[in-house]
């Protein structure tokens, strides 16, 4: 690898004579001569003393995989450094653009994998920072990515609001620190507009507003993209949303004014959004509940309801009390939720058929339910 990196360095120097290499950076104090020492914080935060400019090359940038664009014609891997706090850390996520080379598929990457981007170049696309190939080639990109480990916990979600994460590019001071990070907005939201009603560039896009404070008129609005990382059909206008989460970004989507720089949340799948019922005001449950359906089943769906926002953990246990898998372990808003168990244990292997117990813990409350898993 070292020999290959040296060769790449010579090629890049010839192609981008103006570029600075990180490490060591222009002063020689950004990691010395060692690779994998620059942090995503340095790449994303303009105030960092070791901040590479667009066109500068980077030897080694590590992070945890939090999402993927695995659909042709172009591929992306989104990585983030583990946060130091329960509410996430700013400037810790970045988009790794691999052009037509599906590195995520070729390396078998999944969420929670740790990777090192051994050779890349910083680049600005539609206002968003990317790590991409130093040769800027679409067909033969020379970016180098190495898988380090699997099964790492995902970085903590940043819990934001519609005001903090609203879509306009003028919201730079609030939104920019969370670019390419996991974010979540909890509370009662309402779908105000969708791509089906016109005026939006993407086919699977919609706008959310705070249902408690926005009865109409001009409100802080959050742009949600259901097409980049998944294919999610927008809910109808008026649908209540209990929670939305995903990867917050600035690139890839044109704004209504055609500026191409609105901030937005990219859904990674249907589990990134909890939906209510269109045009209704839902009553919250008075106590915690847990149900499983169907039962027996190969891939059961676990449904639970919360009277207030809580950290929820749902574990699967065998008959002697050993924990087989953790199905849910995150914050949820008050209301009804559901999550499908893929039937795999904590090691990723298919769990044996038989009797199991589900244990839900939300704050100080617990619920227990018997379940039969089929082959």
Image (cartoon, rainbow, N blue to C red):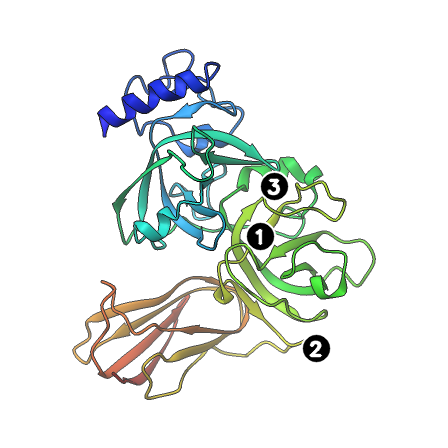
x, y percent for residue 89? 46, 40
Query: Is residue 153 visible in this depiction of the protein?
Result: no
> CA separation, marks 1 and 3?
11 Å
Report which residue position mark 3 lands on. Answer: 175
x, y percent for residue 30? 37, 19
> CA separation, marks 2 and 1?
25 Å
**Which of the 4 image quadrants contains residue 12?**
top left
Which residue shows up at 34% across the image and 55% down it?
A: 110
Q: Residue furthest left?
A: 320
**Which of the 4 image quadrants contains residue 370?**
bottom left
Q: Nearer the viewer, mark 2 or mark 1?
A: 1
Q: Is residue 297 above or below residue 264?
A: below
Disc 1 is placed on an element classified as strand
Which residue shows up at 31% across the image and 45% down it?
A: 114
Which residue shows up at 22% across the image and 82% down it?
A: 353
Q: Dividing the image into 4 quarters, which one contains the N terminus?
A: top left
Report which residue position mark 1 lands on. Answer: 265
* Horizontal relation, residue 20 to residue 179: left or right: left
Disc 2 is placed on an element classified as loop
Which residue shows up at 25% across the image and 83% down it?
A: 375
Residue 280: which numbered mark, if any? 2
User: N-terminal of the two: label 2 or label 1?
Assistant: 1
* Horizontal relation, residue 277 to residue 56: left or right: right
x, y percent for residue 69? 47, 52
x, y percent for residue 357? 28, 80
Q: Is residue 375 above or below residue 263?
A: below
């Amino acid at each position: 690898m070292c020999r290959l990196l040296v060769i790449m360095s010579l090629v890049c120097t010839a192609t981008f004579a103006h570029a600075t290499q990180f490490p060591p950076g222009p002063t020689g104090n950004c990691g010395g001569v060692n690779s994998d020492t620059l942090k995503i914080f340095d790449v994303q935060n303009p105030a960092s003393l070791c901040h590479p400019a667009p066109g500068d090359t980077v030897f080694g940038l590590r992070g945890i995989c939090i999402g993927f664009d695995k659909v042709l014609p172009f591929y992306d891997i989104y990585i983030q450094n583990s946060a130091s706090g329960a509410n996430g850390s700013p400037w810790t996520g970045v988009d790794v653009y691999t052009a037509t080379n599906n590195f995520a598929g070729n390396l078998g990457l999944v969420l929670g994998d740790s990777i090192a981007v051994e050779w890349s170049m910083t680049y600005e696309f539609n206002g968003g920072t990317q790590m991409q190939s130093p040769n800027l080639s679409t067909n033969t990109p020379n970016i180098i990515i190495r898988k380090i480990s699997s099964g790492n916990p995902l970085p903590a979600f940043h819990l934001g609001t519609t005001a903090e994460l609203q879509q306009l590019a003028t919201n730079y001071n609030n939104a920019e620190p969370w670019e390419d990070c996991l974010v979540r907005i909890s509370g009662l939201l309402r779908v105000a507009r969708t791509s089906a009603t016109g005026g939006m560039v993407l086919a699977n896009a919609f706008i959310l507003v705070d249902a408690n404070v926005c009865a109409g008129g001009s409100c802080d609005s959050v742009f949600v993209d259901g097409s980049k990382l998944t294919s999610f059909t927008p809910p109808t206008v008026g649908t209540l949303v209990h929670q939305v989460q995903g990867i917050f970004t600035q690139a890839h989507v044109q704004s209504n004014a055609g500026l191409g720089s609105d901030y937005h949340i990219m859904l990674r799948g249907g589990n990134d959004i909890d939906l209510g019922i269109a045009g209704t005001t839902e009553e919250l449950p008075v106590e915690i509940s847990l149900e499983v359906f169907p039962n027996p089943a190969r891939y059961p769906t676990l449904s639970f309801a919360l009277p207030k926002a809580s950290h929820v953990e749902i574990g699967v246990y065998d008959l002697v009390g050993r924990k087989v898998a953790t199905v849910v372990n995150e914050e949820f808003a008050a209301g009804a939720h559901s999550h499908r168990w893929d039937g795999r244990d904590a090691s990723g292997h298919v769990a044996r058929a038989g009797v199991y117990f589900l244990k839900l813990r939300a704050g100080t409350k617990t619920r227990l339910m018997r379940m039969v898993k089929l082959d």
